[in-house]
Image (cartoon, grey):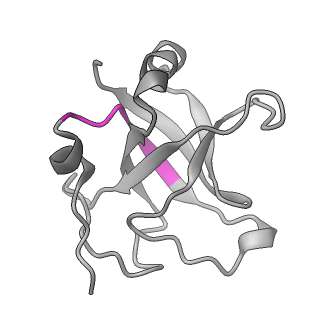
Amino acid sequence: METYQPYEERAERLPDFIVKYEIDLADEIKNAKPGQGMRVDFLYQGDDPQVEGIHMIWPEILDIDGKVITDMTPGSIPRRGFANMWVVDPERREYHHTRLRVGSEGTWWCGGRVAYVTVVQINPL
């Protein structure tokens, strides 16, 4: 089993925000096995990916105690839970911090919808 190194250790900062998620794979990716370390993108609810685009904001799945899951086995994450969210491009962090609100909804996207998400916490820049 490959062990996952939490972004907080690598980035030396807190995640940008935390979401509640529910895996709901789109038909075109129904056989995918989401797991820790997946590189899905973020799409705000109501946005058109052709206009506003999708955003490089990567999830980091948490266990029931709020700790980062270190098992990277594909398909091993819970169907529902919480995840730290990391804006990958430092120049886009401020944009997302002005746009996000607790309760904002969106999806994780990777060739199709991976999960529905709702923002539950926003950390300061």
- Asked whether, in this view, residue 11 is left or right of residue 100, the answer is left
- If the image is split into quadrants, where does the C terminus sit? top left
The picture quadrant where one finds residue 50 is top right
Task: Report x, y in % for residue 68.
Answer: 23, 58
- Residue sitting nearer the eye, 80 or 94: 94
- Residue in the image at 58% along x and 48% along y: 41
- Residue in the image at 40% along x and 33% along y: 120
- Residue in the image at 24% along x and 69% along y: 70
Task: Report x, y in % for residue 84.
Answer: 34, 45
In the rendered image, the vertical position of residue 119 relative to residue 8, given as above or below: above
Task: Report x, y in % for residue 122.
Answer: 35, 25
- Asked whether, in this view, residue 81 is left or right of residue 8, the answer is right
- Residue in the image at 54% along x and 17% along y: 99
Q: Is residue 19 magenta?
A: yes
Viewer can see residue 102: no
Task: Report x, y in % for residue 123.
Answer: 29, 25
- Residue sitting nearer the eye, 56 or 71: 56
In the rendered image, the vertical position of residue 92 relative to residue 57, given as above or below: above
Q: Residue furthest bottom?
A: 1
Q: Residue furthest top?
A: 98
The picture quadrant where one finds residue 87 is top left
Q: Is residue 14 magenta?
A: yes
- If the image is split into quadrants, where does the N terminus sit? bottom left
Q: Which residues are magenta?
A: 13-21
In the rendered image, the vertical position of residue 116 relative to residue 4, given as above or below: above
- Residue sitting nearer the eye, 80 or 42: 42
The picture quadrant where one finds residue 5 is bottom left
Viewer can see residue 87: yes
Q: How many marks?
A: 0
